Image: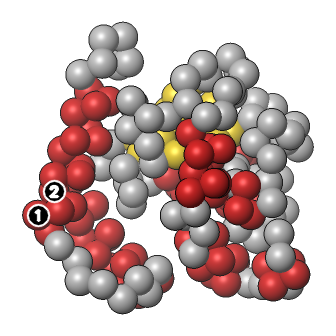
Amino acid sequence: MSSYVEGATGIEKLRFRLSHIGTEESSKIGLEFSPKPEDVFITTFPKCGTTWVSLILHSLRSRGNMDFCEITEVVPWTIMAQSCNQNLNDPQMYCPRLFKSHEDYLSVPKGGKYVYVVRNPPEVIVSYYEFLQNVAKVGHRFRCWCWCWCWCWYSAAWHYVPGTL
């Protein structure tokens, strides 16, 4: 990671990582990643509990070791790992390896195990709005219709794949 991130606070690291979400090269590497059969993906629509579940699973696999500043230091986000100087193929400190993803079933790398988290849609839309306005500071208008379409597509992709639930 850059020297800026090394001495940064958790929220500064989060903002740094969010600024690297859309890089084409990092997304390509994350989407083409070939997981091991024992790898675990925490996959959710944004603002549905990804960080919460990542913390729980990391705590279980590490026997409670929470010696990190920001969760994606120990649970890499597949589509931005390369931009943050993380190699998805590297071993992690604890087993099984955990990975964060907001990709739908059709896009998430296949071959591992998956924890799929669902949250009440009205709660998600409020949380997503607050996140965009106050944390991400993305500076664009929140469009409810666009969010609803995306959420429906994402959820349908996970719910209607035979053998996923």
Disc number for residue 95: none
Q: Position of residue 137 (x, y in %)?
A: 43, 87
What amino acid type is highlighted by mark number 1? Answer: Trp
Q: Position of residue 70 (x, y in %)?
A: 70, 67
Left or right, residue 155 beside residue 137: left
Q: Position of residue 24 (x, y in %)?
A: 56, 57
At 32% across and 69% down in the image, what residue appears? 128
Of the pair 107 and 94, the residue shown nearer to us:
107
Left or right, residue 103 beside residue 145: right
Secondary structure category for the residue under label 2: helix
- Quick one: which residue is furthest to the top in this view? 163
- At label 1, counting other C-alpha atoms closer than 10 Å, the crowd grade (few under 14, some 14-19, many 20 or more) is few
Q: Quadrant of residue 12?
A: bottom right
Q: Which residue is mark 2?
A: 148
Q: Position of residue 10 (x, y in %)?
A: 69, 78
What amino acid type is highlighted by mark number 2? Answer: Cys
- At label 2, counting other C-alpha atoms closer than 10 Å, the crowd grade (few under 14, some 14-19, many 20 or more) is some
**Above or below, comparing residue 22 to residue 95 in the picture:** below
**Above or below, comparing residue 16 to residue 118 in the picture:** below
* Marks 2,1: beta carbons within 8 A: yes
Q: Quadrant of the C terminus?
A: top left
At 30% across and 49% down in the image, what residue appears? 119
Left or right, residue 152 beside residue 93: left
Q: Which residue is mark 1?
A: 145
**Above or below, comparing residue 126 to residue 86 in the picture:** below
**Above or below, comparing residue 156 to residue 51 in the picture:** above
